[in-house]
Image (cartoon, grey):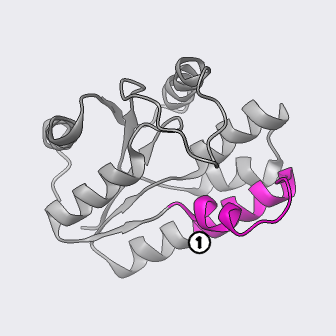
């Protein structure tokens, strides 16, 4: 039986690190965050249309990973795109809502904001992480998505994620 796990949460919470570590632990693949690749090559401020494009491509990549592998971890997904649009633009395009409603993950690992902020040219909201984390919690609850909050640093964070998966009967 195929399993797909989403790693989600605010900026600078270790999503990429955790996705890569979990994939290595289980001997499978992780889908990197397409937004980082796309925005790093952009020579202008990004727009809502850019986020829509990013969402579509991320959705495609996540879907392809599920089709090709028994287990996959997604570094990001449509909750991230939705919250991003809410925070930056004050509204969410229907295209992203549609993708969010179409995506399926067996479990969501929500990364807490307990890690120190790491500056990065693509990160924008160091002082709003707790508020943004609250948006994720609310969405996961409202949508009744199976999730757990990952806390701790380094190997402790990885261990906590593994425990959440194990305790919620996510056999990989």
**Which is nearer the eye, 150 or 14?**
14
Above or below 44: residue 165:
above
- Residue at position x 56%, y 45% from top? 120
Magenta-highlighted residues: 33-59
Asked if the stretch drawn in magenta spans residue 45, the answer is: yes
Residue 85 point in image, percent of width and height: 75, 40
Label 1 environment density (alpha carbons within 10 Å; few <14, some 14–19, many ≥20): few
In this picture, residue 13 sits left or right of residue 49: left
Quadrant in the rendering for residue 150: top left
Residue projecting furthest to the bottom = 68
- Residue at position x 40%, y 35% from top? 110
Above or below 47: residue 41:
below
Asked if the stretch drawn in magenta spans residue 83, the answer is: no
Residue 27 point in image, percent of width and height: 17, 71
In this picture, residue 47 sits left or right of residue 58: right
In this picture, residue 104 sits left or right of residue 28: right
Is label 1 in a helix, a strand or a loop?
helix
Query: Magenta segment, principal secondary structure?
Result: helix
- Residue at position x 24%, y 56% from top? 21
Quadrant in the rendering for residue 139: top right
Residue 25 point in image, percent of width and height: 15, 61
**Which is nearer the eye, 135 or 18?**
18
Quarter of the figure with the N terminus:
bottom left
Residue 4 point in image, percent of width and height: 35, 59
Quarter of the figure with the C terminus:
bottom left
Total labels drawn:
1
Residue bearing the label numbered 1: 60
In this picture, residue 172 sits left or right of residue 146: left
């Amino acid at each position: 039986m195929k399993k797909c796990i989403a790693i989600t949460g605010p900026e600078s919470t270790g999503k990429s690190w955790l996705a890569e570590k979990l994939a290595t632990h289980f001997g499978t693949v992780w889908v990197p965050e397409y937004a980082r690749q796309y925005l790093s090559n952009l020579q202008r401020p990004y727009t809502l249309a850019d986020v829509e494009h990013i969402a579509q491509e991320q959705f495609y990549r996540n879907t392809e990973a599920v089709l090709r592998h028994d287990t996959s971890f997604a570094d990001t997904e449509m909750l991230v795109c939705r919250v991003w649009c809410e925070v930056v633009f004050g509204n969410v395009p229907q295209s992203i809502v549609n993708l969010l409603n179409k995506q399926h993950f067996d479990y969501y690992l929500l990364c807490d904001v307990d890690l120190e902020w790491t500056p990065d040219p693509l990160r924008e909201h160091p002082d709003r992480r707790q508020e943004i984390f609250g948006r994720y919690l609310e969405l996961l609850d409202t949508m009744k998505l199976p999730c757990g909050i990952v806390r701790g640093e380094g190997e402790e964070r990885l261990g906590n994620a593994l425990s959440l998966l194990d305790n919620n009967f996510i056999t990989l």
